[in-house]
Amino acid sequence: HGLGIHPTDVAFANVAKGPHVPALDKYTNRPPHGSGLDTFWRSIENVATYPRHGMRWTVSQAAPLRRMHIGANLDLYDGDAWASGGVMANVVVEGNVNFGGQQQWLMRNVDLRGGEVPVG
């Protein structure tokens, strides 16, 4: 079964951030805001994370979140850094989902228990 049958079988607990992807070129492209438009080929699946400061996933494409349990807020952006979107499937988010300025996110079988924070 690899990591386990259920996402909660493997957990990042008592951590500040847990698995995360910030805007990787924050100071080289469009300083000081940066961009996540070239953040590809990141993925995480079949784990739970309970970060004290929330989880950040600033990605563009080919960077899915699958079979996850996120016991905190989920930020899909990094400040004013541009980001383009991704795929989220079979995910539970206990906190709020902050989309920021994302262009698109495809979601399937996602439970947003804390709701979503509107852009504005």
Image (cartoon, helix red, strand yellow):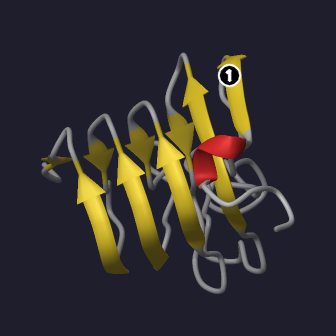
Image position of 25 (left or right of 49): right
Position above or below: 99 against 20? below
- Residue 78 visible: no
Position above or below: 72 against 46? above
Q: Residue at x 66, y 18 (%)?
A: 16
| Viewer-proximal residue among 37 and 95 | 95
Q: Quadrant of residue 99?
A: bottom left
Image position of 49 (left or right of 43): left
**Which structural element holds mark 1?**
strand
Identify residue type, mark 1.
Answer: Ala
Q: Residue at x 57, y 70 (%)?
A: 66
Crowding near the residue tagged with mark 1, few <14, some 14–19, many ≥20 C-alpha atoms within 10 Å = some
| Viewer-proximal residue among 3 and 75 | 3
The spot of residue 11 in percent (x, y) is: 69, 35
The spot of residue 37 in percent (x, y) is: 61, 75
- Residue 9 visible: yes
The spot of residue 33 in percent (x, y) is: 55, 49
**Which image quarter holds the N terminus?**
bottom right
| Viewer-proximal residue among 81 and 61 | 61
| Residue assigned mark 1 | 13
Q: Residue at x 31, y 34 (%)?
A: 95
Q: Quadrant of residue 44?
A: bottom right
Position above or below: 13 against 41? above
Q: Residue at x 73, y 79 (%)?
A: 40
